[in-house]
Amino acid sequence: MIDFKLSEEHLMLRDSVKDYVERDIAPKVNEYDKAQKSLYPEVLPKMGELGILGVCIPEKYGGAGFDYIALALVCEELERIDTSLRVIMSVHTALSSCTLWWWASEEQKEKYLIPQAQGEKIGAFGLTEPGCGSDVANLQTRAHQEGDEYVLNGTKQWISMVEVADSFLIFARVGKEKGVKGIACFIVEKELQGVTISVFHNKLGVRAGDTGEIVLQNVRVPAANLLGREAEGFKIAMTALDNGRYTVAAGAVGSIRASLEASKKYCHERKAFGQEIGKFQLIQEHLAFIQAGYDQSQLLVFKAGWLKNQGIENTRETGMAKWQATNYASDAANRAIQIHGAMGFSGDFPLERFWRNARANTILEGTNEIQKLIQGSFILGFRKKPELRCKLPPYKPGE
């Protein structure tokens, strides 16, 4: 049975994150966004101190030992302020650290996961390529083994946190095997010779976070840094994306809430025709749709989180949450702009930033078109639950 009541620990965690971002980040985030300057160097140390970066990683591996619902609550509070903050949880915690927790050897966990969960090191994720986004099976980055090393060559694009990460999970094709069976995953440290990074500018949204490109030129990676087995890279990527999509969905809930809160405030402040604009029925209709989007999205996220806590495969449910929540977030920002009228179109109000950021979420971690295909293939029985070597770890406090 799903219990919607949050524990005292959940509430304390949520409130501590809310207090931090409202006090220390909210007053300056618009400046970072306008300057297209990453706020990561400023916020990552504090997030590490608060235990946020390893919130759902077991204490055994340096984490805070919370569950997946806690991860969702953190993402909601962060994206309520700005999407770039939630991206940290998607990339560092969900795509990198959770993937290490599920797939890494004990030696790899000791070297990489524990420092990441404690916020001492930052991890990122390298799957997308110039000619390969949704078509993961077509990736062109290559790896071949020479003795006790693999040599990697290729380019990864649209990599979040590229400038601040200490290591990346890089997916590359090995051997002669074609399709998904020929993909492997490697832990690649940024300081290795042959790794070059560059940062993109002039993005539509998420401007307070860095996104860029990784070029790998004859990068020699120890064979000990192979994650899982050679043929398991695609499975590893898919489990990582399930976690990433979950955090995107949870963050979108925060985006909807931000649009709702700004609109409620403005509806009481702005007057037209002798009364608050909130008195007009068409304005109330906009608010009703935003609230409905929030409630529905939060329920979908909690359902996916509950499944994760039980260790139950949740690709369909997580994909549904990501698809619906990000669509609702875009709609909420659009309606909030309409409620604010000309002021919503102004950069002096945060609504246009909410809209730009929400638009990004319908693309990243699998476009919403891909999410629709996932739903359709499950409905028709074309897609079945994946058989993984690693069992999804249920939430066990303190383990």
Image (cartoon, rainbow, N blue to C red):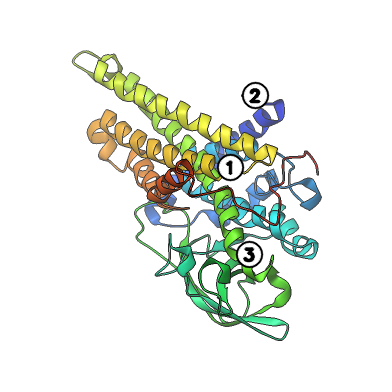
Q: CA distance from mark 3 to mark 1?
A: 19 Å
Mark found first going from the N terminus, 3 or 1: 3
Residue labelled with disc 2: 3
Mark found first going from the N terminus, 3 or 2: 2
Side (left or right) of 315 relative to 359:
right
Mark found first going from the N terminus, 2 or 1: 2
Residue labelled with disc 1: 314
Quadrant of residue 142 in the image?
bottom right
Task: Give above or below for 187 relative to 354.
Answer: below
Q: Secondary structure at mark 3?
A: helix
Q: Amino acid at mark 2?
A: Asp
Question: Which residue is depicted at the point 62% across and 44% down?
Answer: 313
Q: Amino acid at mark 1?
A: Asn
Q: Amino acid at mark 3?
A: Glu
How far across and down, in percent of the image, does residue 370 sit?
41, 51
How far across and down, in percent of the image, does residue 112 sit?
72, 62
Which is more foreground, mark 2 or mark 1? 1
How far across and down, in percent of the image, does residue 245 sit?
52, 47
Q: CA distance from mark 2 to mark 1?
A: 18 Å
